[in-house]
Amino acid sequence: MRGAKARLAQQNQGYLFILPCLLMLLLILGFPAVMAVLNSFSPIWSKGFSFTLENYRRLIHDVVFWNALANTLLFVGSTVALHFVLGLAVALALNAEIRARRFFRILAILPWTVPDVISGLVWRFMYNPTSGIINDVLMKFHLTGNYIEWLGSPSLAMPSIILADAWRGYPFVMIILLAGLQAIPRTLYEAARVDGASSLQEFWHITLPNLKRMIVIALALDIIWQFRRFGLVYTMTQGGPGRTTEILSIMVYKQYFKFFNFEYASAIAVVMAIIMLAISIPYIRTIVRRA
Amino acid sequence: MLFKEVLAVKRVILFLSLVLLVSLTAMGAGTVTLTFSDWHLTEPVWEQSLKEAVAAFEAENPDIKVQLDYVSYGEKETKYTTAIEAGVGPDVMHLHAYSLRSFIEKGYLLDLTSFIEAEGATWYGADFLDPWYEATLQFMEMDGHYYALPGDFMAMVLFYNSELFKEAGLDPDKPPTTWAEFREYAKKLTRDRDGDGKIDTWGFGTPALINPGWELRFSPILFAFGADYLTPDNKFCALNTPEAIEAMKFYVELYTVDGVMPPGVTAVGAGNAREQMAREQVAMVLGCGWTPPIVNGINPDLNAFQILRAVPLPVKAGIDAEYTTTAWLSSWMINKNTKHPEEAWKLLKFITDKAQEEKWFRDNRVQSSRKDVSGGLEDPCIKGYNELLCDPFSKVIAAELTNAKFVPQIKEWPEIIEIVNIAAQEGLTGQKTVEAALKNAYDRINEILSVYREPGEACPPF
């Protein structure tokens, strides 16, 4: 009995310690989220609360919204896949016993340290058709005779952005997977080698199953973050040419800050939040199961 | 003993700190700090000019300090909207006509009417607003209240590199006067100058990036072809006319058929087009008073003030269009959240007075919306600033003002013009035919304009 009381007291003490942080989170994250939801149903700032579904009705019939959603799904699916492939490859390389491993680990993380907007600007310069380094190299090696419009061509703009983001974003997945790789007991690999397993068999039967949980966490978080990606895409194309690279975050930005359609922008943001919540379910399940 | 000494030292330090704190407070007491925001601060030539003006203002008003707030041209609306909605923001701001109406209707700006009325009349009976062109004042007011003062007022004109003209075998004293001529000139100016088999200079540099600057370069073509964006009553989109379709086709085909613009045009902003001119990648651009100093700043070796020429924009042969170019107008305003409206008004008056407007021209080659600086556009008897009137570029720009049209001043304008910008991009990149792109734009714009129509008022067919 005394033991239970002491444990409860300790628990309450713990809650007290996290209370200021919790209050701050509620204020910084919770309040804007609640206001955005309310704003999507009513122009509360200008006219006081009056419930209407007009913004959601407009959303359903807006081809620009569906186009942006399709672009977002393409962008997220492609970048997350590339982040995973690159991240896993680099994590496996860095997990090996190689010389100057620490140096290569730092090198591998560098792209992630570059801010979104700066990455976008740098890649935009590189993609410049007449003065960018990419076309310059391709032309010097006679791989092309014409100026390729990387960001100006409807068929190349999105792949160009995906490539830029793949470079920038893979380190996040790499770090999580590297942590997972390092937690796999070496004895499993030794035993497998004794049994005559090949590298591919080791990877398939030992590495992947033991990394499953970390893969779920990395992918779930990456999907959520990629859904919100804005700076890099906006800096490179502003959603163009036409609307070929207009993703939902750019659409929200334009509706709110350029066109002053606050309520409509809030409705789009709410839909984005619902999608991200749905995506985060596997992540939450994995964390809770572990706890 | 040691303890008493330490205590004594601590007391002395505490006392001195208090004295310092009180002195600093006393020094600051009565001093008002204003925040002044302008995208021009990010341009070296303008930055210097504005800093000098601010220093002069502070010297005249020792109880007012001015903090400079830098913001990019493309993102100024975003920054100001966020700040003003949060109840803060710079005290005095500079905006382009593109978003002025939106800001007025959103209630972001301080009503200046009482300040203007308090200025009273001059000794010769002129009102405070008399020095400004009527054509510019109308955009500063809503429902009889004034919310801003006009700033730069210019018309878009054609700039060309006279040396590139000569190299291409064109007479620099005979610039194109019709858009058909312009097309032919642009083709001749698109050449491989260094003999490596690749084109390195194109005839025409223009932005097509989704950006407010795009409209300034497309509108002259649209107007010269006898077309417009909206009907005069702003109830319907007017891009369904044969003239509008022809104008957009002409613009798109300069790129897709004639190849007279550098590749990647949909990623080119106004600043990029000026860089192309500075690097001699393009021979002609549509520009304004700011063009020569910016081009000169990028590449002083080009000698922009000597080799660039400014001429009126071409016309469409066979059409007597009412307008052949578009007007640029900026404005200065006070944030409604300002805690120092009186001081902010003093700063606003200072930066828009005759002396400063002349300075803006001397330093940055931008023309004023003040008649006593830019000359009597509406009244030829009013003499302007002599240096401005004699400048070879400004003469052309001032003369073109009578052919310049303002874009519609409605709060939906930013969304409408972006839709047209996107339609142009779709045509330039071949995603859609010009007709299909314009039809799509036409439908979307009419949806937006439905707020101005009576229920049941049908849109004309495309």
Image: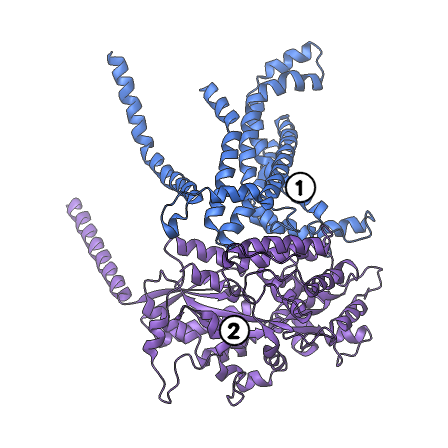
Viewport quadrant of the C terminus of chain A: top left
Query: Type of residue at label 1?
Result: Leu
Q: Nearer the viewer, residue B1 or B420?
A: B420
Q: Which mark is residue A163?
A: 1
Residue B244: assigned label: none
Q: Residues within 10 Å of mark 2 (few under 14, many from 20)?
A: many
From this viewpoint, is residue B273 visible?
Answer: yes
Q: Are marks 2 and 1 on the same chain?
A: no
Q: Colour of chain B?
A: purple
Q: Position of residue A27 (x, y in %)?
A: 36, 40
Q: Is residue B260 left or right of residue A169?
A: right
Q: Against A39, is A217 above or below?
A: above
According to the image, label 2 marks what residue?
B152
Q: Is residue B73 above or below residue A115?
A: below
Where is residue B119? Give x, y as percent: 34, 79
Q: Secondary structure at mark 2?
A: strand
For mark 1, give the secondary structure.
helix
Task: Categorize mark 1 by other alpha carbons within 10 Å: few (<14), some (14-19), many (20+).
Answer: some
Please name the amino acid that badge 2 sits on: Asp
Q: Indicate which label's residue lies in the foreground, 2 or 1.
A: 2
Residue in view at x 63 percent, y 15 percent: A189
Q: Nearer the viewer, residue B447 or A74?
A: B447
Tag 2 subunit:
B
Locate residue B335 relative to residue B446 in the image: left or right.
Answer: left
Residue visible at 22% across and 57% down in the picture? B18
Mark yes or no: residue A115 visible. no
